[in-house]
Amino acid sequence: MAEFFTMLFDTNTPLGWFIVKTLIILAYVAVLLISLAFLLLADRKIWAAVQMRKGPNVVGAFGLLQSFADFLKFVFKEAVIPAGVDKPIYALAPVLTLLMAFITWAVIPVAPGWVITDLNLGVLYILAISSLGVYGVILGGWASNSKYAFLGAMRSTAQMISYEVTIGLVLITVLLLSGSLNLTVIVEAQTGGFWHWNGFALSPITLIMFPMMIVFFISALAETNRPPFDLPEAESELVAGYQVEYSSTFYLLFMIGEYLNIVMMCALITLLFLGGWHAPFDFAPFTWLPPVLWFAIKVCCVFFMFSMVKAIVPRYRYDQLMRLGWKIFLPMTLIAVALVGAWVTFVINGA
Amino acid sequence: MEIGTVLPAIAFYLFASTACICALMVVIARNPVRSVLFLIMTFFSAAALFVMLGAEFLALLLVIVYVGAVAVLFLFVVMMLDVDFVELKQGFAQYLPLGGLLAFVLTVELIVLGTTFRLPENFSAQVPIEQGVSNIEAFGLVLYTDFAFFFEAAGLILLVAMIGAIMLTLNKKKGVKRQNVSDQVARTPKDGLELIDVKPGEGLS
């Protein structure tokens, strides 16, 4: 019997490999969904605190179970499908959004060796998947057969494509510094206390990398349609943008996908600029905490910043958003790529 | 047969048949938006085939460039179309002879090529780069050394194309109020505000 079980979990056989990977993926999904429920609550609580409200506090102690109550509410509501929608595509859009949000996590390492696939081109994979994320939005907007949804989808797509360029260029600066597209290697290159991290390194290059971190953060806000760049959902003009015709579980899928993307961006900032799972000081008692916990703490800190921005920054106008993306961030990041490239060639490699 | 050799074969036929069927559906589908969606599926299957060949970098580039950017533009254009399905059907008989002719010529060409093409006698599948170097490094090693001039020339051509496209679409309209952010930020109460002491009973002229 024991032999049978060791065979089942032996990664050298195809069956064992399949079973082990499936279990790992299920664990990732479960942990992500449960932490998402509490991050959503945290988001609302922080938002409420800034506005001197109490926020959700009825379901469970301190409202801890609010997200689960919302989840059940969404699932049990009637799914209203408006007339004139393109049904297959209408149903495909939210599923696609959720799927893309989940499969990005395949290459995100949360601790040394804790990663589903340690892809050599991990960063490129993330870029590819995030460029696919546009489809959920654009298809949802089009298939809804509604003007508001379509306008929202157009805005959202234009915005996401614009800021993807910036994100790609910022990624290149990090890649140049660590010399690899593998996210694990990128984190390993930042081993040590916070003075080794890309965002705060004790070296002149930080004069470029610190602003790059800020640029990446702002672009991530735009990429995930978060306030102050939530124009696609601008409730005052477009009701809720591309989601306006969605209800019940479909809407829930969109919502989970959106928040998963936000957490993914937080994780990406952590990995690229904040040293991933490394403790901020590489001596006891800081090293007593397991690496995965440090990773989680950092992700939560970045998420806190996301929430604060939502609470305190007013919404941008559309032309301001485009101006920021194309006229400020794009030239800035292009120059930064050139400078970091020169730094790597002439100072680090000493050519 | 070993499972290690069967699995790639199954995967290949899966992706290849998906690509072929989706390519067919691009032409057959009534709704242009669905056509574009099938086109995207075709791109995606092609990318999967690239991965199976060990060209991960090309595969991801295909997804980023074609699926992520080009197809989105297609979709934009197609979604804006006001498609009348009855009218679409009517054109069928009119275009059938020309389309059929084109298909016939292409098929004949493919058959001729397939029957006459022979690999050279001493041909061997060449592996131009040493093993153990990842895709992207291998590209970089030749792209920025041996082919640096071609690479830069390609970049220049793209730059010219981009400037051309911008010049074509750029038209400065008159009477449009544009925002100048630095002007707005530099504005002080002194520039915009004038305090006038109005005498009682006189008003302003």
Image (cartoon, coloured by chain):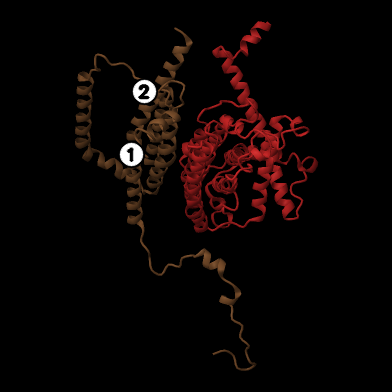
Chain colours: A red, B brown
Q: CA distance from mark 2 to mark 1?
A: 20 Å
In this view, the residue farthest toward the front is A350
Amino acid at dot 2 = Pro
**Label 2 or label 1, whichever comes before in sequence order:** 2
- Answer few, some or many: residues within 10 Å of disc 2's Cα (few below 14, many 20 plus, some between 14 and 19): few
Identify the element where label 1 is drawn. helix
- Residue A195 x, y percent position in the rendering: 66, 40
On screen, residue B82 versus residue B184, left or right, reads left
- Residue B11 x, y percent position in the rendering: 44, 20
Task: Please report the residue visible at 33 percent of the width from the left and 48 percent of the height from the top.
Answer: B161
Q: Identify the residue position indicated by label 1 in the image.
A: B149
In this view, the residue farthest toward the right is A61
Amino acid at dot 1 = Phe
> Which image quarter is the N terminus of chain B in?
top left
Identify the element where label 2 is drawn. loop
Q: Identify the residue position indicated by label 2 in the image.
A: B128
- Residue A6 x, y percent position in the rendering: 65, 10
The one of A61 and B89 positioned closer to us in this rendering: A61
